Amino acid sequence: MNESSHRTKTGFVQAQGPKRTSRKPELPTRPEPDETSVPVAAAQAAPPQQAMYKRFPRGHYTALAEIHAIMSPDVYLEIGVNTGASFTLAGASRLAIGVDPQPCLSYPQPVGTQLFTTTSDDFFASGALREVLGGRHLDLVFIDGMHWFECVLRDLINTERYCDPRSLVILHDILPPSEESAGRTMLPGPWVGDCWKAVPCLLETRPELRMSIVEVPPSGLCLITGLSGGNTALSERYDELIDRYMARGYWNFCAESARFAALTVGFEEALAMHLPWK
Ligand SMILES: C[S@@+](CC[C@H](N)C(=O)[O-])C[C@H]1O[C@@H](n2cnc3c(N)ncnc32)[C@H](O)[C@@H]1O
């Protein structure tokens, strides 16, 4: 893949993929991080989620902290670092690689940190990951950068090159809490974009993967294992997959609810499924 990025008038760094320039939507202002309104709003809208907030009082941070504690990943990659609230959880990793064009760190960074202030497309294209890995593979990856489907797909394609079947890749924001939050236009506040499309896309193109969804507030996590560094199924079909999924909207997400439900498991079950050796 040929990857590039540019800075918009708003100063936000926008990632672009090959031949996709005509699909570039207008970006309004960059949203401020908002970690309090989402859980409250979601819990009020969906009372069953209150139990999930009890289980995961800090939302996905609690879940990620547990995963780090169980895995102690030697090599961790996070795409989309922002304040470092999730990146800081990689304290036990020997190498913690962070990628974000505009990080605004307010949490301590893990000791073995290598932070790349660039878009994920440019980071992967630069060959820096191959260099810092020095032949090692990625143990744990958290994909939480640009929340457009095509960016999530490219992050996954580029990440998989450095994965082995035990590598655990986690996608954030695959359960949009509202139609508004699931749009292609960035919003201030809880914007999760159309990351959800990665789930049906993977189900259809990579049925051999182990995938599970955990309803961690505010917008879910998708856990994936069984990836393979040499697998090119996604990159070979990149344009076709973008064509197929780009036009889908929130209505399609609702229509796919049975498929999402079929993948949804409890947190312990997900850990047993993806980390049976732990
Ligand atoms: C939702 S925040 C990440 C939050 C963080 N992972 C956490 O859980 O605390 C998304 C981040 O992705 C970054 N981002 C935006 N476009 C990106 C790109 N093309 N590549 C990598 N990161 C990007 C933004 O700068 C922002 O800091």
Image (cartoon, rainbow, N blue to C red):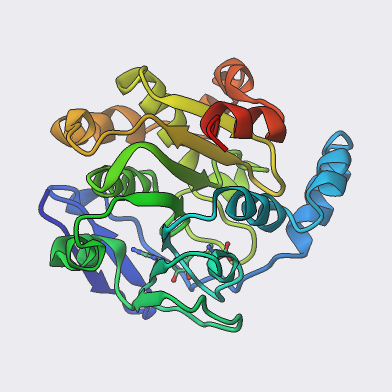
Q: Is residue 167 left or right of residue 232?
A: right
Q: Is residue 138 left or right of residue 170?
A: left
Q: Is residue 113 left or right of residue 253?
A: left
How many marks the image carries: the answer is 0
* Residue at figure coordinates x 29%, y 27% from the top left: 244
Q: Quadrant of the C terminus?
A: top right
Q: Where's residue 271, x and y in %?
A: 62, 34
The residue nearer to you, when weighing 30 against 265, is: 265
Give the answer, above or below, for where 118 lies relative to 89: below
Q: Image quadrant of residue 96?
A: bottom left
Q: Image quadrant of residue 130?
A: bottom left
Q: Where's residue 83, x and y in %?
A: 56, 76
Q: Where's residue 196, x and y in %?
A: 49, 37
Give the answer, above or below, for where 89 lies relative to 249: below
Q: Residue furthest front?
A: 277
Give the answer, above or below, for where 229 lies relative to 3: above
* Residue at figure coordinates x 67%, y 43% from the top left: 177
Give the answer, above or below, for where 32 lies relative to 175: below
The residue nearer to you, when weighing 120 against 47, is: 120
Q: Where's residue 7, x and y in %?
A: 28, 76
The residue nearer to you, when weighing 87 against 147, is: 87
* Residue at figure coordinates x 70%, y 33% from the top left: 268
The answer to whether residue 194 is visible is: no
* Residue at figure coordinates x 17%, y 67% from the top left: 131
The answer to whether residue 143 is visible is: yes
